[in-house]
Image (spheres, rainbow, N blue to C red):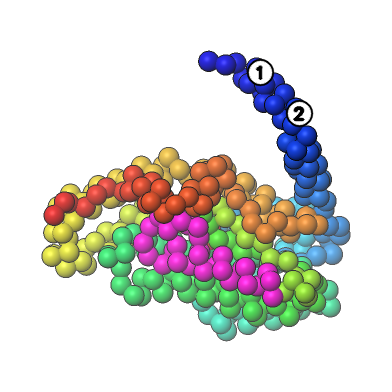
């Protein structure tokens, strides 16, 4: 085996002996340094800026609300429940305001905009983070009924669109930012149900929003987390819902999967989520914070090592490769 040091020096020697390769290396190095420096420029005056975050009862939204509050931002944290709002208020400074919001209810969104517009005054809204989301029902497509899709799409996609449209006037005033939480499941459809559809939709909505709002000075970033331990990846919730989906299937459909399939499917979910989910959710909130505080926010943030080095590269590969990986994660139904 060639030692790594020798290999590197051989490679450098080859590159430096060719003028074109040397130029390419120089340009790439300068571009990387320029990107790194540009990436670290921050906006100023956090204490003059308001950020509205949806889904702050738990998970990423809850941590981000506390994190930005600690940095001096005026955070308006939207929670689904009274308890979520009360717990968050108790854990934050008096600057942080909570508001109740169900993103599937347009009237609730309108009331939240009214509340926020009183808070932000003439400054407008600096940041809108569309974070609220749900995962279940999730599972094989054939086990789903139409309402299982709409339950998820209503929160994760239609909710994001409604909240964004209603907040746009306030964002325009501040030449603010929209941060939309998608997922690596907005790049790869690893499971059936509405979740992947909704996240693919968030990617598309954010792309068109970014292009359309760029002339008005509004920047749009997409967060693409890998797998993290939060309520959306809680095995007990996913398993209970899978049981509901399986139990209502006609016997004929159950028979086509075989008598042991359900248990194997649940075991496979347990195994992959236990291995895949990272407990360090600050990796995601660090990306969200960068999107709100960097002078030049990125268009897409891959959050987590699994997203950066496995799922997103996999999404660029031919479908037969990603299909193969997905099949590895799932048990095969009984052969016919
Ligand atoms: N965890 C992951 O591995 C992962 C990966 C990629 C993307 N994401 C996305 O990250 C976002 C945050 O999820 P999370 O992982 O932090 O899980 P989470 O703790 O369950 O956070 C989701 C939040 O959304 C709230 N919510 C649910 N339905 C709502 C509605 N109709 N209106 C308003 N709020 C609602 C939930 O409230 P309750 O707690 O009261 O239900 C909860 O506070 C979601 O969009 C999720 O899809 C998560």
Tell me: residue 79, above or below residue 318: below
Q: Is mark 1 within 8 Å of ligand 1?
A: no
Report, in whole angstroms, how far the alpha carbon at label 2 lies from the one at label 1: 16 Å
Q: Nearer the viewer, mark 2 or mark 1?
A: 2
Q: Residue at x 17, y 51 (%)?
A: 334
Q: Relative to the observer, which residue lies in front, 236 or 189?
A: 189
- Residue 168 position, x and y percent, is 70, 77
Q: Nearer the viewer, residue 169 or 132?
A: 169
Q: Secondary structure at mark 1?
A: helix
Residue 271 visible from this viewpoint:
yes
Side (left or right) of 262 relative to 172: left
For label 2, being within 8 Å of ligand 1 is answered no
Q: The C terminus is located in which quarter?
A: bottom left
Q: Earlier in the sequence, mark 2 or mark 1?
A: 1
56 with respect to 232 (left or right):
right
Helix, strand or loop at label 2? It is helix
Q: Residue at x 74, y 71 (%)?
A: 214
Tell me the number on the disc at residue 13: none
Which residues are the magenta region? 185-212
Q: Is residue 314 above or below residue 76?
A: above
Tell me the crowding category of disc 2: few under 14, some 14 to 19, or many 20 or more residues within 10 angstroms, Cα based. Answer: some
Name which quarter of the figure residue 211 lies in: bottom right
Residue 62 visible: no
Residue beneath disc 1: 5
- Magenta segment, prevailing SS (helix, strand or loop): helix
Other-residue count near label 1 (Cα within 10 Å), few / some / many at <14 / 14–19 / ≥20: few
159 inside magenta stretch: no
Quadrant of residue 69 in the image? bottom right
Q: Which residue is mark 2?
A: 16
Please give the name of the residue rendered at 58% of the width and 75% of the height, measured from the top-left corner.
161
Q: Is residue 249 above or below residue 173?
A: above
């Amino acid at each position: 085996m060639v030692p790594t040091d020798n290999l590197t020096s051989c490679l450098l020697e080859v590159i430096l002996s060719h003028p074109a390769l040397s130029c390419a290396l120089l340009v790439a190095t300068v571009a990387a340094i320029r990107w790194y420096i540009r990436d670290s420029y921050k906006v100023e005056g956090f204490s003059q800026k308001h950020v509205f975050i949806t889904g702050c009862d738990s998970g990423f939204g809850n941590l981000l609300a506390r994190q930005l509050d600690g940095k001096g931002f005026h955070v308006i944290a939207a929670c689904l429940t009274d308890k979520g709002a009360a717990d968050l208020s108790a854990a934050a400074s008096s600057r942080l305001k909570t508001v109740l919001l169900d993103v599937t209810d347009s009237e609730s969104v309108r009331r939240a905009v009214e509340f926020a517009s009183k808070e932000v005054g003439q400054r407008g809204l600096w940041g809108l983070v569309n974070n609220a989301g749900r995962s279940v029902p999730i599972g094989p497509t054939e086990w789903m009924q139409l309402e299982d899709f709409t339950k998820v799409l209503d929160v994760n996609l239609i909710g994001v669109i409604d909240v964004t449209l209603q907040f746009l006037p306030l964002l325009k005033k501040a030449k603010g930012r929209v941060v939309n939480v998608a997922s690596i499941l907005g790049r790869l459809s690893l499971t059936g149900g509405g979740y992947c559809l909704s996240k693919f939709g968030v990617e598309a909505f954010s792309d068109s929003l970014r292009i359309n709002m760029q002339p008005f000075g509004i920047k749009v970033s997409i967060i693409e987390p890998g797998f993290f331990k939060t309520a959306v990846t809680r095995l007990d919730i996913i398993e209970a819902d899978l049981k509901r989906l399986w139990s209502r299937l006609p016997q004929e459909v159950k028979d086509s999967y075989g008598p042991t399939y359900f248990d194997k499917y649940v075991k496979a979910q347990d195994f992959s989520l236990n291995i895949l989910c990272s407990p360090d959710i600050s990796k995601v909130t660090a990306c969200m914070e960068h999107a709100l505080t960097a002078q030049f926010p990125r268009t897409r943030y891959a959050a987590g090592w699994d997203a950066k080095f496995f799922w997103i590269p996999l999404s660029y590969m031919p479908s037969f490769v990603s299909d193969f990986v997905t099949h590895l994660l799932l048990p095969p139904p009984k052969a016919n």
